[in-house]
Image (cartoon, rainbow, N blue to C red):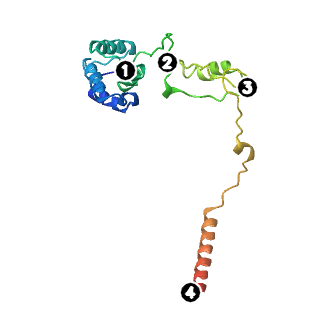
Amino acid sequence: MNFQTSKERIERLYEQKSFTKLTKEEQEAIINAIRDIDDSKLFRNRDEFEKELKKVIKKAGLSIKASVMKAILTALSERDEHADICLDKDGNPEPDPELRDYENVPLKQDIYEYFEQEVKPYVPDAWINETITDDKDGFVGKVGYEIPFTRYFYKFEKLRPSSEIAKEIQELEASIVEKIRGLLA
């Protein structure tokens, strides 16, 4: 994520629910404080931007809730592949929800083995979210079954030639015309 205090991004604050719940005076005070940060500077590190943001908010004599701080960070940020990876309070990389994906692992295969063989070669920085566990067995991942009905129950029927279909349409048209003539006669 990158962060900037440009006019366009500041306008996004009004789309943030926790910011819009503030009084007009509080909103204006926060925006005026934010404007003290150089709007041409692009921050590619969230911690640096947060430090600068807290400094200008403190300088303005403001005290804001964590939800409002999160709203400010969300509004003033944009996804950036070249920016530093955002870390949580424990120093672990935060997941990017836009890149989240799921895999169907064969039932008899170990998920870690599958991950190393089928995922890592294509997405080297991928990881397994080990907080998601199955309710019944308690192991990482959810156990389920996929039944591909078309594979087991579909019977292929060769399409009829277009000339045969055209002939059938002409016969239907003729019978419809004849029935209409019978009604009108």
Label 2 environment density (alpha carbons within 10 Å; few <14, some 14–19, many ≥20): few
Depth check, front residue: 167 or 49: 49
Q: Name the side, left or right, on which 72 lies relative to 184.
A: left
Give coordinates of residue 35: x percent, y percent: 25, 21
Q: Nearer the viewer, mark 3 or mark 4?
A: 3
Q: Earlier in the sequence, mark 2 or mark 3?
A: 2
Q: Quadrant location of the C terminus?
A: bottom right
**Which label is found at residue 184?**
4
Give coordinates of residue 155: x percent, y percent: 73, 50
Q: Nearer the viewer, mark 2 or mark 4?
A: 2
Residue type at numbered disc 3: Lys
- Secondary structure found at label 1: strand
**Labels 2 and 4 touching (C-beta < 8 A):** no
Depth check, front residue: 85 or 8: 8
Q: Earlier in the sequence, mark 1 or mark 4?
A: 1
- Secondary structure found at label 2: loop
Return the residue at label 2. 94
Return the residue at label 1. 2
- Secondary structure found at label 4: helix
Residue type at numbered disc 2: Glu
Return the residue at label 3. 136
Q: In the picture, residue 12 is in which quadrant?
A: top left
Q: Earlier in the sequence, mark 1 or mark 2?
A: 1
**Labels 3 and 4 touching (C-beta < 8 A):** no
